[in-house]
Image (cartoon, helix red, strand yellow):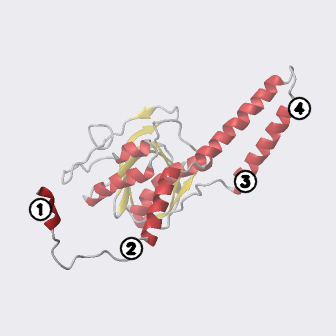
Amino acid sequence: MGLVFLQANDGRSAMRCFDAVAAQNLPVSFYAELRGRKQDHAVKCELERDRLRLIYLSSYDKKAKPAAPARPAAEDGLGDLVIEPGSSRQQDFEALTLALAEIKRVESRNGQLFLKLAKEEVNLSPIYMAAATPTEGPPGRRFANNYTRLFVRYPGMEDSKLANEGMTGLEKLKLAYDIANAGLNIATNLNPIGSVSALQSFIKITREIQGTVKSLRVNFASWERTFEDQQALQTGNAYRPIPTAPISLTFLEELKW
């Protein structure tokens, strides 16, 4: 279910599922494309307490054609999508195993994860099948942070760097400029000849505003419920009354008569 929630871009729910996986001493995993090391690979990323293992699922030649590894990790072609507790796995497969000491830093950047190693830098591009992978702005940074948090929580790589999930100053400046520019185009092209240009400007500004709203969307119902719970906790009774004698139920017997 953790993989399903990652495909839904719900990092919090995915982490709750992965907590149950890690509690059974099983690796927390996701699928990505490894870029670097002179060749691109589709990999299964397995995060364990003391290492990171990148299991090769396929490689790509110069014409971008995939080729299966000479020694695959499992028969399902996915490097054992499901691993049962206590089950034995074959060990003779193509993979890149990195001890935590070999990974200097993990950083979210443009919808990808950059791993800084001792002698080189490689990047992981998580596979996102639900839609086009977000790579720009707050959506792209939040998407990458979902995976970077896995490195922080399970192998304990606290030096990992999360990207800013809000709008940067440059993005705000660009949005203000685009809105002003689009408004000027609409105002100066309100005639039969310039109507197409005005419509294009209107569509552009609408899309930018919609993207901004999505990036700043807040679940107000959840926020209000949390606020009410905190307020009730602060203003509630400091103690709960505990009865010191058995409760008398005489009035119940009288009601029966």
Task: Report if residue 123 is visible in the image.
Answer: no
Q: Earlier in the sequence, mark 1 or mark 2?
A: 2
Say which of marks 2 and 3 sits in front.
2
Q: Rounded to the nearest whole Å, what is the CA distance between mark 1 and mark 4?
A: 86 Å
Say which of marks 1 and 2 sits in front.
1
Circle 4 residue: 188
Q: Quadrant of the C terminus?
A: bottom left
Q: Residue at image x 44%, y 42%?
A: 8
Q: Label 3, secondary structure: give it.
A: helix
Of 216 and 165, which appears nearest the observer? Answer: 216
Q: Rounded to the nearest whole Å, what is the CA distance between mark 4 and mark 2?
A: 64 Å
Q: Earlier in the sequence, mark 1 or mark 4?
A: 4
Which of the 4 image quadrants contains residue 210?
top right
**Within 10 angstroms of label 4, few (less than 14), some, or many (20 or more) residues?**
few
Q: Earlier in the sequence, mark 4 or mark 2?
A: 4
Q: Rounded to the nearest whole Å, what is the CA distance between mark 1 and mark 2?
A: 33 Å
Q: Residue at image x 14%, y 67%?
A: 250
Vertical placement of 173 versus 51: above or below? above
Q: Label 2, secondary structure: give it.
A: loop
Circle number at residue 237: 2
Which of the 4 image quadrants contains residue 134?
top right
**Within 10 angstroms of label 3, few (less than 14), some, or many (20 or more) residues?**
few
